[in-house]
Image (cartoon, rainbow, N blue to C red):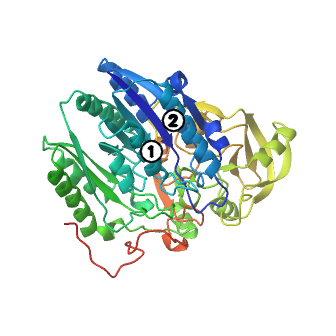
Amino acid sequence: MRIGIIALLQESNTFIAQPTQLSHFEQDMLVTGDAMRERLQGTHHEVGGMFHALEDLSVTPVPIFAARAFPFASIERLAAEELLRRMFAALDEAGRIDGLLVAPHGATVSEPWPDFDGYWLTELRKKLGPDLPIIGTLDPHGNLSPAMVAACNALIAYRTNPHLDQRARGVDAARLIVKTVRGDLKPTMAVAYPPLTINIERQCTHDEPCHSLYKFADEQLNDDSVLSNSIMLGFPYADVAEMGTSLIAVTNNDLDLAQRLANQLANYLWQHRQDFEGHLLSVDQALDQASHLTAPLCLLDMGDNVGGGSPGDGTWLANAISERGLHDAFVCLYDPAAVEQCVAAGVGGKLRLEMGGKTDNLHGPPLVDEVEVLGLYDGQFEETQARHGGFTKMDQGPTAVVLTSRGLTVMLTTRRAMPYSLKQITTFGIEPAKFKVLVAKGVNAPLAAYKEACKSFLKVNTAGCTSADLTQFAYHRRRQPLYPLERDFEWAAS
């Protein structure tokens, strides 16, 4: 048995003006064949789990194509077309396959195809025919489309946020496709689309209200006929027709049961919809509370959530911390120009520096202060534990660490850096325990890493292209009505 593997992942924020280009994929991951195996086989990524499970079952994995770009804007047309060209060329070269494992993200948007995941999965189905099994994994921060569902025999989303179970879900998908090819099972999938969106601030799966939602979903799995179920939390920063939450159930050849289960999940969510509205805390409110909480404290910068595509140079919190004179605080900012100036000054050098706030006017003005350069680094680090994203080797580019005159430690990077690993800071001479406040540019994803160092967390509703306040976004394509953006309507799955 030969099982092919294809992955194409990007979280596309349509509220960012600049496009995602092919170079963004080339900088992150754009590989075929054996190079794909070398890059992903030993990782905590879902594709790493696929390789492991197939080989454990004495099945031959056929690595075909893998592309990933850092979360950013919609993919421009030429880049989207080139990705598809390379994908299908690699598929042609792969030879015979008996089934195909796919790893779309679920929230990928391109200029010609807003439902880019649905488009490329549909094209795969057309090429491979109706009978070859296609089973995939999804990031629950996707906006599930009917096209994605129609193209696949089964789709399985991660069950944790922060995403610590990616490898396990890849294992599940691989085991399921082997049983499907052998004729032991017939995966049958149904979906429900309740008209609501879950606020990003409410999406941590080990906290309420998600904890009870997933517990309810777990109870469905006690039925041996149920192969899997998934909760697609949704990605609100993509203005597409599918934006919002959806529920998936997969059974063994029982479509009616699958639909009933998906509807049960959807109705549960709708009945508890008010619990999934965001609790929005302003910058000033967060800093007022910070003085009463046990240090080290982590402030989660929701408006500059790099994992949602933001620029990573937002300064609302950095400026507020500096203005209040809060000592022993840390923040990371994307700022290649500032890094270049620090390199010129050298370690121990002192200079007046404008930091962050350079991408646009939405994420705050530059932080301006006299600084001392504490260290200069290459920006490469490794994380051996399972962390959000599933990757082990990371590179934030040449990095500078500086101390401002007001006691704020700033790490400046030449690549946008997602705060998913404490190694991102400890590798470069920063000890979290020495700080009262650490700012992480994320919402739920940093929790797994920063819980090792921080006693308390506050999710801060800063302005930005990933703000938790969805009323700040001008949507044109999303479905309507959609709770809580619209409230005066009733709904039930039937």
Residue lying at the far bottom of the rendered structure: 488
Please identify the quarter of the rendering in which residue 29 is found. Answer: top right
* Mark 2: few/some/many CA within 10 Å (<14, 14-19, 20+): some
Q: Is residue 104 above or below residue 308?
A: above
Residue at left offset 17%, top offset 57%: 260
Compared across the picture, whether 171 is left or right of 16 comes to left
- Amino acid at dot 1: Glu
Q: CA–CA distance between discs 2 and 1?
A: 9 Å
Please identify the quarter of the rendering in which residue 321 is found. Answer: bottom right
- The answer to which of 204 and 321 lies nearer the viewer is 204
- The answer to which of 337 and 124 lies nearer the viewer is 124
Rendering coords of residue 469 (x, y %): 50, 69
Residue at left offset 73%, top offset 64%: 365
Q: Is residue 86 above or below residue 309?
A: above
Q: Is residue 492 above or below residue 154?
A: below
- The answer to which of 137 and 77 lies nearer the viewer is 77
Compared across the picture, whether 40 is left or right of 304 comes to left
* Mark 1: few/some/many CA within 10 Å (<14, 14-19, 20+): some
The image quadrant where one finds the N terminus is top left
The image quadrant where one finds the C terminus is bottom left
Asked if residue 208 shows in the view, the reply is: no
Asked if residue 315 shows in the view, the reply is: yes
Q: Are marks 2 and 1 in contact (CB under 8 Å)?
A: yes
Rendering coords of residue 275 (x, y %): 32, 67
- Amino acid at dot 2: Phe
Give the mark nearer the N terminus: 2 vs 1: 2
Residue matched to label 1: 123
Rendering coords of residue 277 (x, y %): 38, 68
What label does residue 58 carry, if any?
A: none
What label does residue 88 carry, if any?
A: 2
